[in-house]
């Protein structure tokens, strides 16, 4: 799929299809084991590679893991996640979150956490179950496809902005095909294990991971629909 000139004015169905691919995207945390064909994964990446980037730098690098390669990575990370002494040796390479939390961000963060753990019936005091649920990240929530994203260390903040557009494009293109995703910063703590496993060279830094697959319709955690501010809450119309 290559870039094309603008097609004629979109039909109502085309508008609805694009909007639905965006608005039905949710971070899902339970997948069926049904494999995703390699051609489908490639198709999604071809579409997403049309994401814009400053001066067309295309700062993304993707490692797609399935089968044994995915299972072996999950096992290595789980071993570190489940051993407090080992886990302490793994620290994030970049700050995804602020070091100082403020309202409204902290409130939204708490709300989504409570909503997810509430659905799963995990009490705030139940550290063992919270640890296990967090560990589901490293099994890609049962998804048949795990992706790891890296960026060259010479690239700056602007390229991380480009990267977000690429990631969102993957998630939307997946949704258009009936697939679901979960972007995962949880992997960044274990970047050393991951870059070694995928064979990324030292100039590449892990940005995040992502699960891709078909959602498990029976999983209670997949019923979570997160809230959003109304447009008036984050927009000023001037003039
Ligand atoms: C870059 C990025 C990293 C994320 N990391 C994780 C993660 O490690 N584990 C997880 O369960 N969800 C993760 N999420 C999902 C967010 O919690 C989710 O996007 C947010 O709560 C809004 O919900 P929605 O995606 O269903 O609309 C991440 C989202 C983004 C964009």
Image (spheres, helix red, strand yellow):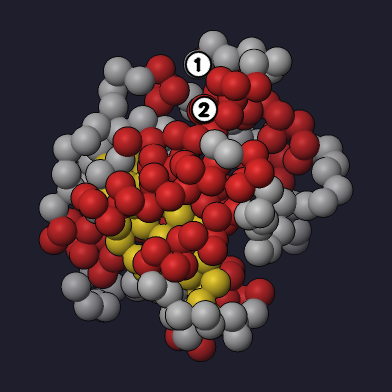
**Under tag 2, what secondary structure?**
helix
- Dividing the image into 4 quarters, which one contains the N terminus? bottom left
Decide which of 237, 177 is in the foreground and name it. Answer: 177
Look at the picture and state if 154 lies above or below 171: below
| Image quarter of the C terminus | bottom right
At a point 21% along the width and 50% down the height, the residue shown is: 67
Number of disc labels: 2
Which residue bears the numbered disc 1?
120
Give the Cα separation between the discs numbered 1 and 2: 12 Å
Q: Nearer the viewer, residue 24 or 64?
A: 64
Q: Secondary structure at mark 1?
A: loop
- Graded by Cα atoms within 10 Å as few (under 14), some (14 to 19) or many (20 or more), the crowding at tag 2 reads few
Q: x and y percent of residue 131 in the render? A: 58, 29
Q: Position of residue 235 (x, y in %)?
A: 70, 49
Examine the rendered structure and indicate whether residue 122 appears above or below residue 29. Answer: above
Comes first in the chain, label 1 or label 2 = 1
Q: Can residue 11 be seen?
A: no
Q: Which mark is residue 132?
A: 2
Determine if residue 160 is in view: yes
Q: Which mark is residue 5?
A: none
Instruction: Say whether residue 10 is left or right of residue 209.
Output: left
Task: Identify the residue at horizontal 71%, vertical 58% (top origin).
Answer: 95
Q: Could you tell me residue 30's position as x and y percent?
A: 36, 30
Q: Residue 25: horizontal and vertical position, in percent?
A: 40, 41
Give 153 or 167, whichever is nearer the viewer: 153
Residue drawn 48% across the image and 24% down it: 224
Q: Is mark 1 within 8 Å of ligand 1?
A: no
Nearer the observer, 195 or 115: 195
* Displayed quadrant of residue 20: top left
Circle 1 packing at 10 Å, graded few (<14), some (14-19), many (20+), is some
Residue at x-position 51% and y-position 28%: 133
């Amino acid at each position: 799929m290559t870039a094309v000139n603008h097609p004629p004015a979109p039909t109502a169905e085309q508008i609805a299809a694009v909007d639905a691919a965006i608005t039905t995207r949710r971070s899902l945390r339970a997948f069926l084991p049904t494999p995703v064909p390699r051609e489908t994964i490639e198709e999604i990446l071809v579409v997403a590679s049309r994401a814009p980037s400053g001066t067309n730098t295309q700062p993304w690098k993707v490692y797609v893991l399935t089968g044994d390669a995915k299972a072996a990575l999950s096992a290595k990370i789980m071993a570190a996640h489940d051993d407090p002494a080992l886990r302490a040796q793994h620290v994030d390479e970049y700050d995804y979150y602020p070091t100082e939390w403020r309202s409204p961000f902290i409130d939204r963060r708490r709300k989504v956490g409570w909503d997810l753990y509430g659905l799963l019936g995990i009490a705030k005091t139940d550290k063992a179950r919270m640890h296990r649920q967090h560990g589901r990240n490293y099994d890609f929530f049962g998804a048949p496809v795990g992706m790891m994203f890296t960026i060259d260390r010479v690239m700056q903040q602007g390229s991380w902005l480009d990267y977000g557009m690429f990631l969102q494009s993957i998630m939307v293109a997946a949704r258009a095909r009936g697939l679901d995703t979960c972007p995962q910063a949880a992997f960044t703590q274990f970047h050393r294990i991951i870059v070694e496993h995928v064979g990324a060279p030292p100039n590449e830094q892990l940005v995040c991971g992502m699960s891709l697959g078909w959602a498990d319709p029976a999983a209670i955690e997949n019923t979570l629909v997160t809230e959003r501010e109304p447009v008036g809450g984050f927009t000023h119309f001037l003039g």
